[in-house]
Image (cartoon, helix red, strand yellow):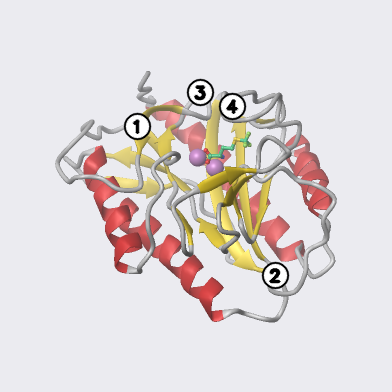
Amino acid sequence: MIEILNPAELARAKVTGALVADILQTVRSRCTVGTNLLDIDRWTQTMIAEAGAQSCYVDYEPSFGRGPFGHYICTSVNDAVLHGLPFDYSLADGDLLTLDLTVLKGGVAADSAISFIVGDSKPAESVALIDATERALRAGIAAAGPGARIGDISHAIGSVLSAAGYSINTEFGGHGIGSTMHQDPHVANTGQPGRGYKLRPGLLLALEPWVMEDTDKLVTDADGWTLRSATGCRTAHSEHTIAITDNGAEIITLPTQAA
Ligand code: MF3
Ligand code: CO
Ligand code: CO
């Protein structure tokens, strides 16, 4: 089903979006060499509760995971790219970490993901991979103007990733979002301009380019959730929730304070 939000719901979506972004920024600022992924999960659990919000993950039991997720944030390190299940691992210098968070507040969900490098070493290949996913996300948002279709967004994202030399996996992509985390329409990370559902004001979309350095094949970790690159190569993922308005797309998952 495709949900169209009314102005009151859109106002609440912005509150949820700012909360998601602020939690991600706080977690990021606390991540240093030696930080344990389970600490990140506990910090997130606390911040969600303190904000009077609900986790969209803890009880989530989709077909693509094993049993309820049981945690509050996805922590995907290096070759892990999507749905990283937090486990007892302490971050090392140069680790490429993706945090992906979805919460519900006021009946509306928002979803965002950031990738960054932990510590002082900045491997050039990781910097390039993160840069490509962020540019693809910006291109997707820019393509979500008045009169655009889902295919315009998909094409914009895919063009940036392909031009950067990465192959694209279409098993997972962006999605509608609203009263629940995952809704129609699906937003593939590659596609044809002019095709698909026509955007309309009140539509909330999560756009989420993700890339693997040298493969388009995923493997599922023994934990039943974490998706890794089949070759063990590094990976990155960037996601924002955007609201379609009369004037174009508005990013609702921006932090309230500059980093
Ligand atoms: N937030 C993810 C997405 O971008 C979904 C994570 S589901 C989980 O669609 F169960 F793995 F947390
Ligand atoms: Co997400
Ligand atoms: Co998402």
Q: Earlier in the sequence, mark 3 or mark 4?
A: 4
- Residue at 71% from the left image edge and 25% from the top image edge: 68
Say whether marks 3 and 1 touch (CB < 8 Å): no
Relative to 156, does residue 220 appear above or below in the rendering? above
The quarter holding residue 164 reads: bottom left
Q: Which residue is mark 1?
A: 203
- Residue at 60% from the left image edge and 66% from the top image edge: 116
Looking at the picture, tell me which residue is in the foreground, 95 or 11: 95
Q: Is residue 15 visible to us here?
A: no
Where in the figure is residue 92, as x and y percent of width and height?
77, 69
Q: Quick one: SS at disc 4?
A: loop
Q: Residues within 10 Å of mark 3 (few under 14, many from 20)?
A: some
Q: Residues within 10 Å of mark 2 (few under 14, many from 20)?
A: many
Looking at the picture, tell me which residue is in the foreground, 223 or 153: 223
Q: Which residue is mark 4?
A: 106
Q: Amino acid at mark 4?
A: Gly
Q: Amino acid at mark 3?
A: Ser
In the image, farthest residue toward the top: 1
Relative to 1, does residue 64 appear above or below in the rendering? below
Q: Which residue is mark 2?
A: 118
- Residue at 74% from the left image edge and 74% from the top image edge: 93
Say whether marks 3 and 2 touch (CB < 8 Å): no
Q: Amino acid at mark 1?
A: Leu
Q: Nearer the viewer, mark 2 or mark 1?
A: 2
Inter-mark Cα distance, 3 to 1: 12 Å
Q: Amino acid at mark 2?
A: Val
Inter-mark Cα distance, 2 to 1: 35 Å
Q: Is residue 85 visible to us here?
A: yes
Q: Does residue 182 appear to the left or right of 89 in the view shown?
A: left
Q: Earlier in the sequence, mark 1 or mark 4?
A: 4
Q: Which residue is mark 3?
A: 179
Say whether marks 2 and 1 touch (CB < 8 Å): no
